[in-house]
Amino acid sequence: MNAQLSFDDSLADLRRRVQERSILPLDLGRELQQVADRHMPITCFSDYHSGGSEWKIAHDRYNQVAHLLFQAHEPHLAHLILQNWWMALGIEQQRTKHRYPLAAPTFWLAQIFAWVGDPGLAFRWALLTAIHDIQSGLSDSPALQMAQATFGFGALAARKLVQLQKRR
């Protein structure tokens, strides 16, 4: 992969190679991680807590990467890249003591595991997403609604999560 390509060109090249079936899954994962490292470094998310815009661009790019992996029927690669993103955001949040958009990768992870038929892991990631949403001040979390509608997470338990956050 050419290191000088823009994000859009890099993704278009990978999308073409996926459609032509001219790239192996492990190579796709490696090249997508290189694209992420080059065009969406974790430092892009440092302006999240201050309402900046750079993090939104990186967030949208991660969504595009995850979508490409769904199209390529490579949920395990999406899982690895998104979990790496989530862990890197969490490490930065701990290091800087600033909020990071942890709900973004966890919501995709919930979708991946629901798609591959693993309700236990799908529920785990949906619940983590809801908790991240609640911690960010979003009391009407779409992920919490997903946990309730898809997995039967009770309304009483959902209210308890919101109450726990309010006590902090």
Image (tube, grey):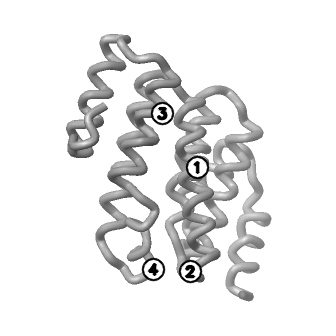
User: How many neighbours does mark 3 have within 10 angstroms: few (below 14), some (14-19), or many (20 or more)?
Assistant: few
Seen in the picture, residue 106 relative to 110 is either above or below; the reply is: below
Image quadrant of residue 102? Answer: bottom right
Distance Cα–Cα, label 2 vs label 4? 11 Å
In front: mark 1 or mark 4?
A: 1
Residue type at the position of mark 3: Arg
Residue 49 numbered mark, or none: 4
Using a 10 Å C-alpha cutoff, classify the residue at mark 2 as few (fewer than 14 neighbours), some (14 to 19) or many (20 or more): few
Q: CA distance from mark 1 to mark 4?
A: 20 Å
Q: What is the spatial separation of the Cα atoms under label 1 and label 2, in whole angstroms?
A: 18 Å
Q: Earlier in the sequence, mark 1 or mark 3?
A: 3
Please state if 20 lies on the left or on the right of 166 as rendered. Answer: left
Label 3 residue SS: helix
Number of the label disc, if any, that sits on residue 84: 1
**Quadrant where the N terminus is found in the figure:** top left
Q: Answer whether labels 1 and 4 touch (C-beta < 8 Å).
A: no
What amino acid type should be assigned to the residue bearing mark 1? Asn
Identity, as a three-letter code, of the amino acid under mark 2? Thr
Relative height, residue 1 to residue 52 (above, below): above
Residue at 73% x, 49% y is 124
* Dot 3 or dot 4, earlier in sequence: 3
Most extreme residue toward the top, as rendered? 21
